[in-house]
Image (spheres, helix red, strand yellow):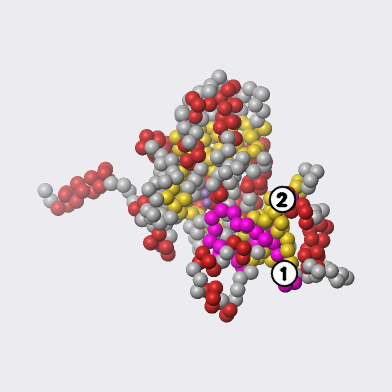
Amino acid sequence: MSKKEEKTKAQQLKEKLLMKNESGAKTLGEEEIKKAEDFCKDYIGFIGKAKIEREAVEYAIKHAKKSGFTEYDYTKNYKPGDRVYVNNRDKAVMLAVIGKNGTKNGVRLGIAHIDSPRLDLKPNPLYESSDLALFKTHYYGGIKKYQWPTVPLALHGVVVKKNGKVINVTVGEKDDEPCFVVSDLLPHLANEQMSKVMTKAFTGEDLNVLIGSLPFRDNDESESVKLNIMNIIFKKYGITEEDFLSADLTMVPAAKPREVGFDRSLIGAYGHDDKVCAYPALRAILDIDTPERTTITVLTDREEIGSDGNTGMKSTYLADFIADLAKQDGEELRHVMRKTDCLSADVNAAFDPSYASAFEANNSSFINRGAVITKYTGSGGKYSTSDASAEFMAKIRNILDSKNVLWQTGELGKVDGGGGGTIAKFVANLNADVVDLGVPVLSMHAPFEIVSKIDVYETYRALYEFYSFD
Ligand code: MN
Ligand code: MN
């Protein structure tokens, strides 16, 4: 046997037995890359508008209505192909397309979260100190506190008056509007600060947002800067200081989403985690035809703080909805749930060459290699994770491969390097099969996170094909 033939045999075996490791982007045709480009234009429009969960819900319902979705009424009977939505307190939303067999063979779920790390205002936020007016904040979700000072911030949320009137607030997004900022110490005077460990150098109580400096004139009262700011707020929104007690107000980065890189292949934005999966999950449910099983996209809240609360995935709101749908079909929730499949659409950490030691390269997700499937998250010895079964992994592999979706697997960093979780375990606890699938992200939880256009589009394709697969 010649040497050349031996090599051919090895090549043949390699092809048959070993995983292909070439970069995903190289395997895509021009047309696919163009589709990703178009899809991401829409995504950039969404992520620029929907910075907090309430805005994402508003966007989703507006577009769902245009696609023929109507508000769900549990007293009504629905037929295959009907499209309905449930608005949970303006902070979470479920969108369902009734399947040809309804809930009889279980339902298909795609669940993403629409809350992102940020600086919430405290219930009594406004104060004056050394002739400056500031807001006290309480950070929401996992942040590296040093990343938030000196970043232009915008105020988003609602204030609700005692009579129930809801006042929407957005300041700092438009070019002609002012923004806000957390100050930092100049390096000249930061010897003490810079010698501290990072967890101590910036504390939660240091994250105070500068909101003004001019005093109320024609007045010799104390706290006249605070009074002047409150007067401006009152004139614009009709609210008094006491009304902050009934408000959901938060400071988010004011930065607009931008294309990143000479090749414009990446998108930088605040809140990719997890709107970068929420948008594909929304589009997938809007785009599918009547599926075999009833299919539901859930855009949920509270994931970043552990999914507690009535709009988070530990709440019964999803199970209650499925129970209502099951009842119409003469089915019981428990029988529907054990046949239910779910993609928990959430992001994973993309391998970052600048921080390579935090990752294990054989089991990391990479930018431009497509949607990442994360079999388990958690920490330590696989604590706090549902860990998808081999059987369910096989099912998802089959769906994605049969539709030529570009995908990869990823673990969240090195063993014992830290850890994290998603909503997957809460869905698994309802006795459904579930695995995480989403977009790899660089600088996750930073004020400006990075994703690739190809990965966003392939995540959409994964969700769409999962929903459409019989
Ligand atoms: Mn997430
Ligand atoms: Mn997160």
The label on residue 412 is none
**Distance of mark 2 from mark 1, alpha carbons?**
23 Å
**What amino acid is at disc 2?**
Ala
Q: Residue at x 49, y 68 (%)?
A: 197
Q: Residue at x 25, y 47 (%)?
A: 14
Judging by the rendered image, the residue that carries numbered circle 1 is 129
In the rendered view, tell whether residue 34 sits above or below residue 148.
above
Q: Are marks 2 and 1 in contact (CB under 8 Å)?
A: no
Q: Residue at x 81, y 69 (%)?
A: 222
Q: Position of residue 77 (x, y in %)?
A: 63, 22
Looking at the image, which residue is at 17% across and 52% down?
A: 4
Q: Secondary structure at mark 2?
A: strand
**Is the residue 321 above or below the residue 345 in the image?**
above
Mark 1 residue crowding within 10 angstroms, few (<14) / some (14–19) / many (20+)? few
- Look at mark 2 in the image and give the residue it sits on: 247
Task: Mark 2: give few (<14), some (14-19) or many (20+) Cα within 10 Å.
Answer: many
Residue positioned most to the left = 1
Image-quadrant location for residue 448: bottom right
Give, as a single range, the part of the protein colored magenta. 130-159
Q: Would you say 57 lies left or right of 353 here?
A: right
Nearer the N terminus, badge 2 or badge 1?
Answer: 1
Image coordinates of residue 169 in percent, x first then y, are: 73, 53
Closest to the observer: 266 or 322? 322
Does the magenta portion include 138? Answer: yes
**388 left or right of 55 in image:** left
Camera-nearest label, 2 or 1: 1
Above-or-below relation of 322 to 353: above
